[in-house]
Image (spheres, rainbow, N blue to C red):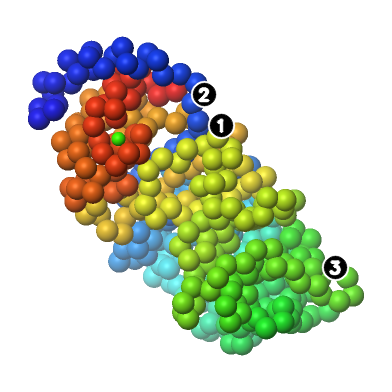
């Protein structure tokens, strides 16, 4: 295997008969759309077929783009902007975020974007940032901590000041009459309703609200956020439908060290029975009934094999908890911070194809060159090996003839299942 181009055909022929015994259901897998630079998906439509995200920050800001499995990538406007986490209309036609530069070098800040272009709240300054959109895309929840200090709801014509606080974590009900946010000044979770105004949602006894993220039911009656106590972190639901607010811990984690943990809500299903989130850098799924599982255990339960990966992150989940998107660290060891965009549709996942090393759904010579290099390095602990050792198909720690047999079969088939 020192010269892959010479040896390939002969080895494939030798291995051929060992493979004919392989059979059985092919598990589904993620797809990894190619993009010229790392892409981070931050919002997803209800049906999971439209995604908004951004490339890496450059001098002017991150380039924003929309991706769909049917069309691929298309840019969001001409100017660098940051689509906000989960701030997309249910149908995917409207996306909210923060625009860093625009024509004539004016600073516009918070925006709603659609195919018709950008629209900006009347008082947004360069620090204006979108935080949430109603499901129909008509109302924008946005905050500004520069010229017009506060949190606002803007319906495209008029806007209402909710508070002079300027949160980063906020959510809005479908009818724009209820808002939840975490105060950056006090760390308290607040709920605003049109008419009744602001109230504070108390955390469970002995805990404080974490300033990380908040999500809300479509009707605004239930709010979800993380709380922190002396020894644990919890995902908590506040039920505001009755005369008294009730809290329930959905799941808890031991508190990692004395520092503040990281956590992010990727999404909640419309029936509120599934919540996807990250905690301390790892992805989890909470489901009513099954409780807390790692994202990978959840995938296994659905017949999905994610494949080798490093630093897996789930960034967004659609409204029926069947479509997920996120990033993983690129498997190339020298590309420190680069990430690879992945997309998984449980309704329509392509067959798992471990031998397709460049993710083009074909196992050909390009993949063989990558496999041959791994075969030469042999040991997954070899520092030259790609991170996560993706060519060790049987996960026994080495890339040897057993893995080659798997590769050869896939090479013979050429097209991934
Ligand atoms: Ca390939
Ligand atoms: Ca192996």
Query: Is residue 201 placed above or below 75 in the rendered structure?
Result: below
Horizontal side of residue 245 vs 79, given as left or right: right
- Residue neighbourhood size for the residue with mark 1, other residues' Cα within 10 Å, grouped as few (<14), some (14–19), many (≥20): few
Q: Distance of mark 2 from mark 3, alpha carbons?
A: 46 Å
Q: Distance of mark 3 from mark 1, alpha carbons?
A: 37 Å
Residue 241: which disc?
A: 3
Q: Position of residue 392 (x, y in %)?
A: 30, 37
Secondary structure at numbered mark 1: loop
- The nearer-to-camera label among 2 and 1 is 2
- Residue neighbourhood size for the residue with mark 3, other residues' Cα within 10 Å, grouped as few (<14), some (14–19), many (≥20): few
Question: Of callouts 3 and 1, which one flags the residue occurring earlier in the amino acid sequence?
Answer: 3
Q: Position of residue 240 (x, y in %)?
A: 81, 70
Question: Of callouts 2 and 3, which one flags the residue occurring earlier in the amino acid sequence?
Answer: 2
Q: Residue furthest front?
A: 396
Residue 348: which disc?
A: 1
Residue 25: which disc?
A: 2
Query: Is residue 183 placed above or below 14 in the rendered structure?
Result: below
Q: Is mark 1 within 8 Å of ligand 1?
A: no
Q: Which of these two is toward me, 254 or 26?
A: 254
């Amino acid at each position: 295997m020192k010269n892959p181009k010479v040896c390939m055909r002969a080895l494939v022929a030798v291995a051929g008969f060992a493979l004919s015994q392989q059979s059985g259901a092919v598990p589904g897998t993620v797809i990894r759309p190619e993009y010229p630079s790392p892409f981070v998906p931050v919002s997803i439509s209800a049906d999971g077929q439209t995604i908004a995200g951004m490339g890496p920050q450059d001098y002017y800001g991150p380039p924003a783009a929309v991706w769909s499995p049917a069309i691929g990538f298309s840019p969001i406007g001409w100017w660098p902007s940051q689509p906000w986490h989960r701030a997309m209309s249910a149908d995917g036609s409207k996306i909210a975020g923060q625009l860093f530069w625009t024509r004539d070098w004016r600073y516009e800040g918070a925006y709603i974007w659609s195919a018709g272009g950008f629209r900006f709240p009347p008082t947004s300054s360069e620090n204006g940032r979108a935080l949430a959109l109603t499901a129909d895309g008509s109302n924008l929840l946005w905050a500004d901590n520069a010229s017009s200090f506060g949190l606002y709801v803007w319906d495209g014509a008029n806007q209402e000041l909710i508070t002079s606080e300027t949160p980063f974590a906020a959510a809005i009900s479908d009818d724009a009459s209820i808002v939840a946010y975490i105060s950056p000044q006090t760390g308290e979770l607040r709920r605003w309703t049109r008419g009744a105004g602001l109230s504070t949602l108390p955390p469970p006894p002995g805990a404080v609200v974490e300033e990380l993220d908040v999500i809300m039911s479509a009707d605004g009656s239930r709010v979800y956020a993380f709380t922190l106590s002396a020894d644990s972190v919890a995902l908590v639901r506040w039920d505001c439908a009755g005369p008294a607010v009730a809290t329930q811990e959905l799941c808890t984690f031991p508190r990692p060290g004395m520092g503040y943990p990281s956590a992010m809500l990727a999404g909640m299903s419309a029936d509120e029975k599934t919540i996807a989130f990250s905690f301390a850098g790892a992805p989890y799924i909470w489901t009513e009934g099954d409780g807390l599982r790692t994202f990978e255990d959840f995938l296994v339960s659905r017949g999905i094999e994610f494949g080798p990966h490093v630093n897996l992150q789930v960034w967004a989940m659609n409204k029926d908890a069947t479509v997920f998107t996120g990033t993983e660290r690129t498997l190339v060891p020298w590309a420190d911070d680069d990430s690879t965009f992945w997309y998984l549709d449980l309704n329509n996942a392509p067959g798992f194809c471990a031998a397709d090393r460049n993710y083009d759904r074909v196992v050909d010579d390009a993949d063989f060159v990558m496999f041959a290099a791994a075969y030469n390095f042999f040991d997954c602990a070899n520092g030259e090996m790609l991170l996560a050792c993706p060519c060790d198909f049987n996960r026994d720690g080495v890339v040897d003839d057993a893995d080659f047999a798997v590769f050869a079969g896939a090479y013979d088939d050429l097209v991934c299942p």
